[in-house]
Amino acid sequence: MGQINSERSLSSVSVYLVAENRLLRETLIRLLQKRAGISIAGESRYTESVAEPIAASQCDVLLLDSPPATLARVLVDELCANTPQTKIILFGMDEDPDCFLSAVCLGVRGFLLKDASSAEIVGAVRGVAEGEAVCPPKLCLTLFQCVMRECRHKPRTTGQHAFAKFGLTYRQRQLVILVAKGLTTKEIATNLHLSQFTVKNHIHRIMKQMDVQSRYEAVDVIRASGYLPDA
């Protein structure tokens, strides 16, 4: 695992790169370093502990090269809970609608295919850093169709409105439901394949977003909406 020291201006976008292929990492680093307004916070291959240096780098954007599905799920979950300011882009991906939709549910901001050009990667980094979402047009249509089907077949309930009101993500909703079932932090971590530290951070963010004092108060608020069953 290599850490790169790069002088960063206040206006630059800090990027951390994770890719298994060393030649690809070195090539992309050279490419990005030549672009004005982009600095390199660090680089690494895939490891079980890769979330730690990414979080420590406080990078603005994380570039992940076609990560294994299980690793991507765990890594993105940890980063969304612990370093929510880091925006994640997957690149080198197949044009797989199911994989794309799963990535969106996890919270990634960009999804680039294997044939993405260097200009598209640089454009995605800058766009995502500015608050945009980036994906191929065909997969964007897939997302629209998915939302349309959900709206048609699963009418919004008051509970779903309550979730939306507090801006809870799909993962946070899962946590609230498991807390409502009486599961402990350890049991929730096992159930969702997360670390206990990540679960605690998710719960802390839920409490902050809902302006409540405990996880159980959060459950009570959602339950009062009629979405969660009574204990």
Image (tube, rainbow, N blue to C red):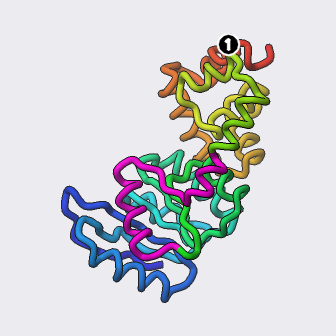
Residue ID at (54%, 65%): 112
Please rate how many residues cluster around mark 1, counting C-alpha atoms within 10 Å: few if below 14, some from 14 to 19, many from 20. some
The answer to which image quadrant residue 126 occupies is: bottom left
The answer to which image quadrant residue 119 occupies is: bottom left
- Residue 23 in sight from this viewpoint: yes
Any magenta on residue 2? no
Residue 51 drawn at (x, y percent)? 52, 61
- Residue 231 in sight from this viewpoint: no
Residue 136 drawn at (x, y percent)? 55, 60
User: Farthest residue in the left direction?
Assistant: 9
Q: Secondary structure at mark 1?
A: loop
Residue 229 drawn at (x, y percent)? 80, 17
Is residue 177 shown left or right of residue 138? right
- Residue range in magenta is 116-143
User: Farthest residue in the bottom direction?
Assistant: 23
Query: From the viewer's perspective, is residue 88 above or below residue 156?
Result: below
Is residue 228 shown left or right of residue 214? right
Is residue 209 shown left or right of residue 113? left
Residue 6 drawn at (x, y percent)? 26, 73
* Amino acid type indicated by mark 1: Ser
**Could you say which is closer to the camera, residue 113 or residue 28?**
113
Considering the whole magenta stretch, tell me its main secondary structure.
Answer: helix
Query: How many marks overall?
Result: 1
Residue ID at (38%, 68%): 122
- The quarter of the picture where the C terminus appears is top right
Is residue 183 shown left or right of residue 63? right
Residue ID at (43%, 69%): 121
Any magenta on residue 136? yes
Mark 1 = which residue?
225
Residue ID at (73%, 56%): 98
User: Farthest residue in the top direction?
Assistant: 224
